[in-house]
């Protein structure tokens, strides 16, 4: 009850701030500048004096004039200095942990999380929960469960803990929030992805009050359902005995003992034998909502999510990253969220405009339908940091923009000059699977030096390979104008489908989140690689050109 009241109050305050987003944003900026005035960056750019400017427009203009926009490759040296222990380079206080996130090089980046940033993110989380319960009021009084990553990534050179932000936040939830969740943290440190999914599903299947299942990626939710269906005997034995059987190592020691449920075990066993499925009404009888990302290439998995889980509504996970939280979803079954105008200072670079600080727009100056690169200033030591993410404005709530993630800004790939994007290939594959009535869970478009794309798919998928290749070529030409032009001019050869050994592609894509030694909650399979001839990494079972 206390939690829901806090959620509701936080959300109402946020909606009020959306009426005057520029004022809310200026308050964010002043707060960050005051906190960081004594940092090396603050001294160099005179943050203390800027924070004292009373006129909002003058403050923003002065800040933009003094501080350059920098992506990670320009800011990396400063962030590495913070990681090495020189936290005053950027941060208003000593970091309490480092959030590990995989960069484009495959190496981890270590992003500082200060107590100031943690406070801002905590406030944003209350707003998000308020939005979720406002859109899905049936969740009030029910449990919700987030699937998170491991925080057990060791320590920095200065002795500060490091790991995935979701796991650190889960470990340190306030008591009133912790009561809404059911899973012990230690299961998220199991080193086998299938074991983690099974452990989560088995514990949740014991409870009748799970109202929402939440994960950053819809693939995590699909994996949970798959793990239960592939281990029905194990699940029923565990439910009968009140045990949890796992086969992999956990970085954090833990035990689980539940209450024996022989009747539920028998009902699930009977349903499986009769229909080959585990009905949602038996597994999670109170489930009302599935929470995950809907935008970017994650939208490809939503049809399968609906097919596998049936009736629950979908609600989007916040537009967020290890750097911060940038938009608050507020409508069920709709992608996108309201810009988080009370959390960080946000700027937007028009996608096709020349670079430079002068091009950056504030949240109140955006246009519906336009796409922008997101630039953020946070209390964690990031000042005009180019996220290198593209967002689209889909509308406004009051005067605050509604943002949907599109793609990474550097996501275009060309063999000739087609400028293919992950959105193009995702849309093409979605159209093919709907038209042919098949489901291709993992796929990867690969640019090749012989002037064509090869599409790597798992050899388990039953399909008519010639028909699949021909339809995929047709749909890609319809989805991507540049690809169609280059094919018309014979500068590209027809695409070729490559079938790999079962599970080989899945294992390769799951490594994309970083070293496998640290369990990750963000299964974000790539659909398009920039690496030429990457198909040569796989054992080929069959091929067919369109």
Image: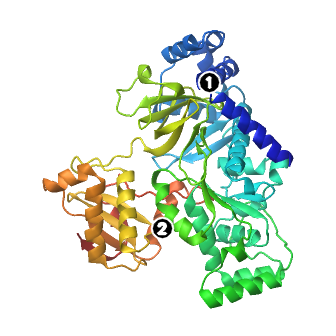
**What count of labels does the image hold?**
2
Please give the label number shown on residue 20: 1
Residue identified by numbered label 2 = 506
Q: Are marks 2 and 1 in contact (CB under 8 Å)?
A: no
Return the residue nearer the eye: 89 or 285. 285
Task: Name the front one of labels 2 and 1.
Answer: 1
State the quadrant of the C terminus.
Answer: bottom left
Looking at the image, which residue is at 62% across and 26% down?
A: 90
Residue 226 screen position, x and y as percent: 59, 74
Quadrant of res 344: top right
Residue 535 screen position, x and y as percent: 33, 64
In the drawing, does residue 254 fall left or right of residue 407?
right
Looking at the image, which residue is at 73% across and 64% down?
A: 187
In the drawing, does residue 432 fall left or right of residue 386?
left
Considering only vertical position in the picture, is 310 above or below 107?
A: below
- Marks 2 and 1 sit apart, C-alpha to C-alpha, by 46 Å
Looking at the image, which residue is at 39% across and 34% down?
A: 351
In the drawing, does residue 261 fall left or right of residue 48?
right
Considering only vertical position in the picture, is 500 above or below 520?
A: below
Secondary structure at badge 1 equals: loop
Looking at the image, which residue is at 37% across and 63% down?
A: 431
In the drawing, does residue 103 fall left or right of residue 97?
left
Considering only vertical position in the picture, is 343 above or below 176?
A: above
Residue 59 screen position, x and y as percent: 58, 13
Return the residue nearer the eye: 75 or 475. 475
- Asked whether residue 52 is in view, the answer is yes
């Amino acid at each position: 009850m206390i939690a829901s009241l806090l959620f509701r109050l936080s959300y109402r305050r946020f909606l009020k701030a959306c009426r005057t987003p520029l004022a809310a944003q200026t308050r964010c900026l002043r707060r960050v500048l005051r906190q960081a005035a004594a940092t090396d960056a603050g001294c160099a750019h005179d943050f203390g004096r800027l924070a004292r400017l009373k006129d909002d427009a003058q403050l923003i203009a002065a800040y933009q004039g003094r501080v350059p926009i920098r992506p990670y490759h320009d800011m990396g040296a400063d962030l590495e200095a913070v990681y090495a222990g020189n936290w005053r380079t950027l941060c208003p206080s000593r970091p309490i942990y480092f959030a590990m996130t995989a960069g484009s090089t495959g190496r981890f980046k270590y992003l500082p999380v200060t107590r100031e940033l943690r406070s801002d993110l905590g406030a944003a989380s209350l707003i998000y929960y308020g939005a979720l319960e406002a859109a899905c009021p049936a969740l009030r009084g029910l449990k919700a469960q987030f699937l998170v990553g491991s925080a057990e990534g060791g320590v920095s050179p200065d002795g500060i803990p490091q790991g995935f932000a979701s796991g650190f936040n889960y470990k340190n939830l306030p008591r009133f929030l912790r009561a809404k969740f059911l899973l012990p943290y230690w299961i998220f440190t199991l080193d086998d992805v299938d074991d983690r999914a099974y452990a989560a599903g088995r514990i949740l299947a014991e409870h009748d009050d799970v109202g929402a299942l939440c994960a950053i990626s819809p693939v995590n939710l699909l994996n949970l359902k798959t793990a239960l269906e592939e281990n029905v005997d194990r699940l029923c034995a565990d439910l009968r005995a009140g045990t949890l059987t796992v086969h992999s190592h956990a970085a954090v020691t833990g035990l689980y003992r539940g209450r024996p449920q022989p009747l539920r075990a028998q009902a699930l066993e009977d349903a499986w034998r009769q229909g080959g499925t585990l009905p949602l009404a038996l597994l999670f009888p109170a489930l009302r909502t599935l929470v995950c990302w809907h935008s970017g290439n994650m939208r490809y998995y939503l049809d399968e999510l609906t097919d596998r889980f049936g009736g629950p509504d979908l609600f989007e996970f916040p537009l967020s990253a290890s750097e911060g939280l940038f938009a608050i979803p507020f409508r069920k079954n709709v992608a996108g969220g309201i810009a988080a105008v009370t959390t960080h200072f946000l700027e937007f670079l028009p996608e096709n405009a020349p670079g430079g600080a002068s091009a950056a727009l504030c949240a109140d100056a955006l246009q519906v339908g336009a796409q922008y690169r997101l630039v953020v200033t946070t209390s964690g030591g990031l000042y005009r940091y180019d996220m290198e993410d593209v967002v689209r404005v889909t509308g406004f709530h009051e005067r605050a923009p509604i943002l949907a993630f599109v793609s990474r800004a550097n996501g275009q790939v060309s063999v000739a000059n087609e400028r293919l994007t992950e959105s193009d290939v995702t849309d093409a594959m979605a159209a093919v699977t709907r038209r042919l009535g098949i489901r291709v869970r993992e796929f990867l478009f690969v640019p090749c030096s012989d002037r064509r794309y090869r599409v790597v798919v798992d050899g388990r998928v039953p399909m008519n390979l010639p028909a699949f290749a021909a339809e995929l070529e047709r749909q890609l030409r319809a989805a991507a104008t540049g690809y169609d032009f280059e094919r018309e001019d014979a500068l590209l050869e027809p695409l070729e489908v490559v079938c790999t050994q079962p599970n080989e592609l899945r294992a390769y894509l799951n490594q994309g989140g970083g070293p496998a030694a640290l369990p990750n909650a963000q299964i974000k399979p790539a659909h398009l690689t920039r690496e030429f001839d990457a198909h040569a990494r796989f054992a080929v079972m069959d091929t067919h050109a369109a």
